[in-house]
Amino acid sequence: MKDAFKRPQNWRVFSRRVIFEMKELGVDSIVIVAVISVFVGAAVVMQILLNLENPMYPKWIYGFVSRKAMMLEFSPTIISLILAGKCASKIASEIGTQRITEQIDALEVMGVNTASYLIMPKIIACVVFFPLLAIQSIFVALIGGYIGGLLLGNLTLFDYVEGLRLEFGMGDLWYAMVKIIINALIISTLSCYRGYTIKGGSVEVGQQSTKAVVQSSIIIMIFNILITELFN
């Protein structure tokens, strides 16, 4: 990690690598994040409507609870687990393949700081783009929540939006951003480490990719508890 955060040797090449990694790790994840978010958002609101249907509850409570659930837990945490499955395995297998095929050794012979060249762009891409994916997830999930309310036919747009707007503060959004940035660091650094330090052949690439996903997911859940405790 110390070598990865050293000053890049060629800023032009480095910036191209960052843009390329943003496309590979961020842009290519937009569709899967949107699809999962809209269905989960719809399912959450439908469950709330089915289990909290009571004349004593105000109608805005469904939108309020939906917003809290999406902003505080689903988008920063569950989406991070999905991205861990998609991106951590990709990063670990890509760098691991470069290691066992001696591409990294060839770069080092030419005097290239391979840690900075291969790892740092991936970390920057994850830290920059994952928060954008989380914001997209929140927005799409809340739209999906309204679709779920329409499917059951007992939630109006006015009541749902009133709940979304009720007591809305930037604190919840900052909380979500802190979580997703920390999760992005966990996913990118751990998966890069697994790939960069691999020894063996193609079998070990698959094993290290699996370890990257599993360990990233476990550490994300541990930090989720710690961050929740710190913010409360």
Image (cartoon, grey):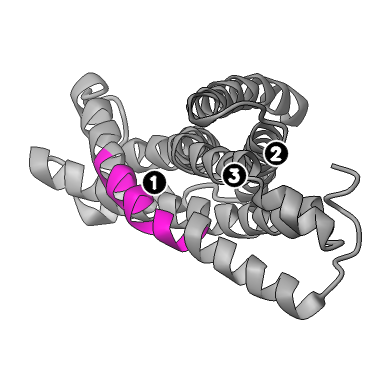
Mark 3 vs mark 2: which is more N-terminal? 3
> Considering the image in quadrants, where does the C terminus appear?
top right
Percent x, y of residue 13: 72, 75
Name the residue nearer the viewer: 229 or 159.
229
Percent x, y of residue 88: 54, 38
Residue found at x 65% / y 66%: 18
- Mark 2–mark 1 Cα distance, whole angstroms, equals 48 Å
Tags 2 and 1 in contact by the CB under 8 Å rule?
A: no
Percent x, y of residue 78: 46, 33
Percent x, y of residue 188: 65, 43
- Which mark is nearer the camera, 3 or 2? 3
Residue 163: image tag: 1
Q: Residues within 10 Å of mark 1 (few under 14, many from 20)?
A: many
Q: Amino acid at mark 1?
A: Gly
Residue 155 visible in this rendered orientation of the protein: no
Residue found at x 44% / y 50%: 138
Mark 2 vs mark 1: which is more N-terminal? 1
Tag 3 residue:
101
Q: Is residue 86 left or right of residue 12?
A: left
Would you place residue 173 above or below residue 12 in this image? above
Residue found at x 51% / y 55%: 25
Q: Magenta span has 209?
A: no
- Which mark is nearer the camera, 2 or 1? 2
